[in-house]
Image: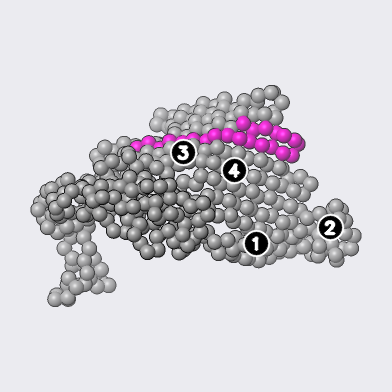
C-alpha cells in the first residue's frame, strides 16, 4: 500500500496492490488521485484577454478609402488606428464591439481519478486483466453569452438581459461552472514474446459526460449547452466520447530460416527467406456524438433547436443518409425544442496498420535493416459527421472524411 502527500500544496495519491492467493498469480490493484490544474481560457491569447474585460472591433479597408493615411501599411501594421478604449456604456453600445470577460469567481479546476483492476496470470506466457477506471472534473471553465436574446416577440435588442448593452450580441463570460465525468470498463489480454509470437488485445467500454466543451479546444460536434438559460439541462456526451474501442497488436517471427521450424540450410536461401518479422495493429472504434440543429431558426434571434419525436437512428445507415431526419421537427415559435446534446453518433472505423521487417547480415558487424510499413492498409475511409441541419436538402448526408488515406513507406538502415 502506498500513500503519498509529499509537501504542503501537493496533491494526494493513494494506491494499493494485493496478492490474493500469495502465489503472485492473482493481483488486485486500486488507486486514487487528486490533481489541481489551471485551465487556459485560450492557449493563443491568454495575455491579451486578461481580466476584467476585453473589447475588440473589426474593420475593413473600405473604412479608410477616403483617407489613405489611415490605411495600415507594412511599416506600420498596427496603426494609426485608434484603439477602442470605451469611456462609457453608451460608447460600448454604439460601437458594438465583441466583449469578453472572466468571472471573479476564480475557483481552481481539479480532477479526481480512480482505478480498480484484477490481473491474473493464466499460463507462463498469458496474462488477463479486467478493471474499472473513472474520473471527475470539477470547476471546469465554460464560456457562455450573458447577453443571449431570450424567447419572445418584438425586437431582438429588447429581449437581451443586459439592456444597457442591448446592441451587443455577445458578452462572453468565462466561469468555472462546467463539470465532467468518465466511467469505463477496461479489459486486456497479453501474451509475452515467446516462440516468436507476441500479442496484446485491449477493449474499453466507456462513457464521458459534461455540460459543455473545453474553452481552449472546443467541444467537438456536441459543443456546449443549447441555451444559457438552462446550462445543466444539457449535460450530455463529451465531444470526444467513444463508447467502444478495441485494439489488437501483434508481432510474429515467421518460422522460416536456419534453426527455425522450417529449417533452411542454404545460406543464400536463408538470407532471402529467413528472419522475416511481421507486425500489425487493428483498431476498431465507434463514432463520436453530434448535435442535430435547424437550418432556419424559429425563435426570432433566440437559439432554435428541433424537437425529437423519434429515436432517429437507422438500422442500416450509410454515408448518403446516416440518420432519420424525419425524427426531428422544428418546434412552435418561442420554444427551444427538446433535443439533447450529442443524441446521435457518427460512423465508426476499423483501421489496420502493418509492418514487415528483416535484418540482412552482410558481415559479422555490418548489417542492413529493411522495413516496410503500411498505414490504413485497406484504405478504409473514416467518415466525418453528417449534415445535421434539419431543413437542409442534404440533411443526413456525409460528404467528407477525417482520417488519412492509405500510406506506404519503405526504409533501410545500415549498422556497423
Of mark 1 and mark 3, the one earlier in the sequence is: 3
Of mark 4 and mark 3, the one earlier in the sequence is: 3
Q: Are marks 4 and 3 in contact (CB under 8 Å)?
A: no
Q: Position of residue 156 (x, y in %)?
A: 17, 53
Q: Are marks 3 and 2 in contact (CB under 8 Å)?
A: no
Q: Which residue is mark 2?
A: 257
Q: Which residue is mark 3?
A: 182
Residue sitting at x 65%, y 24%: 20
Pointer 2 local density, CA inside 10 Å: few below 14, some 14–19, many at least 20: many
In the image, 316 versus 365, the foreground residue is 316
SS of the residue under disc 1 = strand
Of mark 2 and mark 1, the one earlier in the sequence is: 2
Q: CA distance from mark 3 to mark 2?
A: 49 Å
SS of the residue under disc 2 = loop
Mark 1 vs mark 3: give the one in front.
3
Q: CA distance from mark 4 to mark 2?
A: 35 Å
Q: Position of residue 261 (x, y in %)?
A: 85, 52
Magenta extent:
118-139
Mark 3 vs mark 2: give the one in front.
3
Q: Which residue is mark 1?
A: 373
* Disc number placed over residue 203 in the picture, else none: 4
Q: CA distance from mark 1 to mark 3?
A: 35 Å
Amino acid at each position: 500500500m502506498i500513500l503519498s502527500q509529499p509537501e504542503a500544496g501537493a496533491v494526494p495519491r493513494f494506491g494499493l496492490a494485493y496478492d490474493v492467493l500469495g502465489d503472485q498469480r492473482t493481483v488486485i490493484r486500486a488507486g486514487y488521485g487528486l490533481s489541481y490544474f489551471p485551465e487556459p481560457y485560450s492557449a493563443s491569447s491568454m495575455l491579451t484577454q486578461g481580466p476584467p474585460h476585453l473589447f475588440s472591433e473589426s474593420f475593413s479597408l473600405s473604412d479608410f478609402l477616403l483617407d489613405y493615411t489611415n490605411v495600415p501599411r507594412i511599416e506600420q501594421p498596427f496603426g494609426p488606428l485608434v484603439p477602442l478604449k470605451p469611456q462609457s456604456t453608451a460608447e460600448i453600445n454604439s460601437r458594438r464591439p465583441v466583449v469578453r470577460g472572466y468571472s471573479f469567481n476564480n475557483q481552481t479546476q481539479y480532477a479526481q481519478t480512480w482505478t480498480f483492476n484484477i490481473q491474473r496470470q493464466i499460463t507462463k506466457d498469458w496474462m488477463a486483466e479486467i478493471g474499472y477506471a473513472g474520473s471527475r472534473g470539477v470547476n471546469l471553465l465554460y464560456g457562455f453569452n450573458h447577453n443571449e436574446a431570450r424567447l419572445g416577440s418584438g425586437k431582438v435588442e429588447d429581449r437581451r438581459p443586459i439592456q444597457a448593452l442591448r446592441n451587443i450580441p455577445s458578452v462572453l463570460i468565462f466561469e468555472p461552472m462546467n463539470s465532467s465525468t468518465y466511467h469505463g470498463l477496461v479489459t486486456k489480454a497479453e501474451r509475452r514474446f515467446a516462440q516468436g509470437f507476441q500479442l496484446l488485445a485491449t477493449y474499453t467500454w466507456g462513457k464521458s459526460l459534461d455540460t459543455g466543451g473545453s474553452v481552449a479546444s472546443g467541444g467537438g460536434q456536441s459543443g456546449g449547452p443549447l441555451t444559457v438559460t438552462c446550462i445543466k439541462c444539457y449535460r450530455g456526451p463529451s465531444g470526444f466520447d467513444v463508447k467502444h474501442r478495441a485494439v489488437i497488436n501483434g508481432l510474429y517471427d515467421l518460422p522460416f530460416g536456419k534453426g527455425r521450424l522450417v529449417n533452411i540450410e542454404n545460406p543464400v536461401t536463408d538470407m532471402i527467406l529467413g528472419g522475416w518479422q511481421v507486425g500489425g495493429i487493428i483498431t476498431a472504434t465507434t463514432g463520436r456524438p453530434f448535435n442535430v440543429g435547424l437550418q432556419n431558426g424559429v425563435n426570432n434571434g433566440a437559439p432554435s433547436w428541433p424537437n425529437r419525436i423519434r429515436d432517429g437512428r437507422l438500422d442500416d445507415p450509410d454515408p448518403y443518409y446516416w440518420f432519420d431526419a424525419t425524427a426531428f421537427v422544428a418546434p412552435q415559435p418561442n420554444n427551444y425544442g427538446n433535443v439533447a446534446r450529442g443524441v446521435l453518433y457518427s460512423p465508426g472505423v476499423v483501421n489496420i496498420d502493418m509492418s514487415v521487417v528483416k535484418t540482412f547480415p552482410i558481415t559479422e558487424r555490418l548489417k542492413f535493416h529493411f522495413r516496410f510499413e503500411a498505414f490504413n492498409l485497406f484504405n478504409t475511409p473514416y467518415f466525418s459527421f453528417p449534415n445535421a441541419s434539419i431543413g437542409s436538402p442534404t440533411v443526413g448526408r456525409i460528404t467528407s472524411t477525417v482520417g488519412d488515406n492509405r500510406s506506404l513507406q519503405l526504409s533501410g538502415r545500415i549498422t556497423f
